[in-house]
């Protein structure tokens, strides 16, 4: 490596920096390109060590590829098994259906049919309960939101109409029944005024 611009405190720190840089570059640049730029040669022990590391990496890759292939094979097998069981169920249901139409159901087929009917009925009832509960809670929350918004608009409307009414009363545009402008309200005795 060319390190003319850099100064090191010792030869060991220089070698350490070079080896660190070498390891870093080996991951990015092909090893041959990095080694071509190297002025001194590697020892045989280092060369053997590097070859063993490369071989270990390839073994890891092989294991990884084998694991992926095994998982893929297992998924494929599982899909095939699911498809086979589905086909068997459909065939069994078709046979039971034809026997039922011809009124040739065996006791076992009748039990199986009743079991399926109960299972489907239970699953439907559970599903409807869940949907009903969710739907009910959604409707209640929506109803609460609508009522809250309606109350607020009603409150604002009432306040505005009351304010408008009071302003019109003050201006004299409208008259309030029971009050005569400039006169005392009906039912007020003259005695009350004298006591002041």
Image: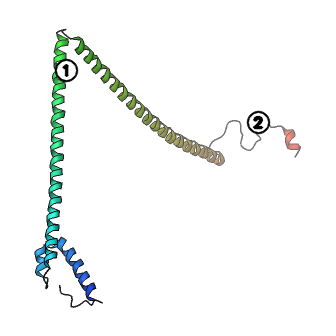
Disc on res. 93: 1
Pointer 2 residue: 186
Q: Residue at x 37, y 28 (%)?
A: 126
Q: Is residue 104 above or below residue 172?
A: above
Q: How is the image coloured?
A: rainbow
Q: Quadrant of residue 136?
A: top left
Q: Secondary structure at mark 1?
A: helix
- Quadrant the N terminus occupies: bottom left
Q: Secondary structure at mark 2?
A: loop
Toward the top, the furthest residue is 103
Q: Position of residue 174 (x, y in %)?
A: 63, 42
Q: Residue at x 38, y 31 (%)?
A: 131
Toward the right, the furthest residue is 195
| Left-right relation of 172 to 191 | left
Q: CA distance from mark 1 to mark 2?
A: 90 Å
Indicate which disc, 1 or 2, sits on the residue closer to the N terminus.
Answer: 1
Q: Residues within 10 Å of mark 2 (few under 14, many from 20)?
A: few
Q: Is residue 101 above or below residue 83?
A: above
Q: Residue at x 14, y 49 (%)?
A: 69
Disc on res. 178: none
- Taking depth in this image into account, of 13 and 174 the one nearest to the observer is 13
């Amino acid at each position: 490596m060319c390190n003319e611009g850099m100064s090191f405190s010792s030869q060991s720190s220089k070698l350490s920096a070079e080896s660190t840089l070498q390891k870093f570059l080996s991951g990015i640049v092909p090893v041959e390109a990095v080694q071509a730029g190297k002025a001194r040669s590697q020892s045989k022990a280092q060369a053997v060590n590097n070859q063993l590391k490369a071989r270990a990496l390839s073994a890891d890759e092989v294991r990884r590829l084998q694991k992926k292939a095994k998982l893929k094979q297992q998924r494929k097998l599982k899909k095939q098994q699911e498809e086979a069981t589905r086909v068997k169920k459909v065939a069994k249901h078709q046979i039971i259906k034809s026997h039922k139409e011809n009124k040739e159901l065996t006791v076992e087929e009748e039990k199986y049919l009743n079991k399926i009917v109960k299972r489907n009925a239970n699953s439907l009832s559970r599903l409807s309960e869940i949907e009903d509960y969710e739907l009910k809670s959604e409707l209640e929350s929506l109803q609460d939101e609508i009522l809250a918004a309606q109350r607020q608009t009603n409150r604002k409307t009432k306040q505005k109409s009351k304010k408008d009414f009071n302003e019109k009363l003050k201006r004299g545009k409208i008259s309030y029944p029971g009050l005569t402008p400039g006169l005392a309200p009906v039912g007020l005795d003259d005695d009350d005024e004298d006591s002041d």
